[in-house]
Amino acid sequence: MNVPFRVNNCSIERTLDIVGEKWTFLVLREAFSGVRRFADMQAITGAPRQVLSARLARLVDEGLLRKEPYREPGQRQRDEYRLTEKGRDLYPLLVALMHWGDKYLSGDEGPPVLLTHRDCGAPIELHFRCADGHEVGGPREVTPLPGEGADLRSV
């Protein structure tokens, strides 16, 4: 991307500061799949307890997950982790990463998971469009411009 300006407050950098780590994406993957409890997330992801605890705490602090207390009969109260709207808004990003991995990393055996529309069964596709509905084929069809919140510095 060749642009005549650079921003100090890049949204990509700020987003990666929160979610740009393997375990965070795996926690979010499981949350999108309906996994809510610490022990289940740990068993599925294989994350070390301290790492998983730290990632869950960060996602709660950032408002992507919220804690919901629960208690099994005879057990102490624990927390489930549920996606917030802010967290659910990351779903297209995870699907885009999955589709990229399916295309370039799956090998001859094909993708390990297929996402389909619950109502009709058709495969899920991601589309890149402008606000007027035109299909955008890639970065060469995009013009970056400073936004209202741009903190500009000269290149």
Image (tube, rainbow, N blue to C red):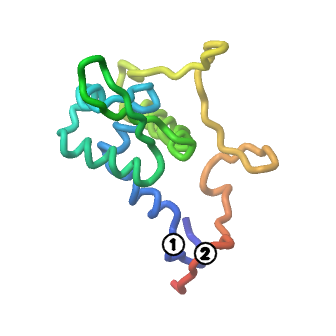
Q: Give the Cα separation between the discs numbered 2 and 1.
A: 7 Å
* Labelled disc at residue 31: none
Q: Secondary structure at mark 1?
A: loop
The location of residue 129, given as percent across then percent down, is 71, 45
Amino acid identity at mark 1 = Asn
- Residue 144 position in % (x across, y down): 64, 66
Q: Residues within 10 Å of mark 1 (few under 14, many from 20)?
A: few
User: Dividing the picture into quarters, in which one does residue 71 lie?
Assistant: top left
Q: Which residue is located at x 52 percent, y 43 percent?
A: 90
Marks 2 and 1: CB-CB under 8 Å? yes
Residue 12 spot, x, y in % from top left: 49, 60
Name the disc covering residue 9, or none.
1
Q: Is residue 144 above or below residue 66?
A: below
Q: Which residue sits at x=52%, y=63%?
A: 11
Instruction: Please tell me in which quadrant of the rendered image residue 39 appears.
Output: top left
| Residue that badge 2 annotates | 150
Q: Position of residue 7 (x, y in %)?
A: 54, 75
Seen from the viewer's position, the closer of residues 78 and 152 is: 78
In front: 115, or 15?
A: 15
Q: Is residue 37 above or below residue 17?
A: above
**Rendered-image quadrant of the N terminus:** bottom right
In the image, what residue type sits under mark 2?
A: Ala
Q: Is residue 56 left or right of residue 149?
A: left
**Viewed as shown, does residue 108 lie left or right of 10?**
left
Tell me if residue 3 comes above or below residue 64 in the rendering: below
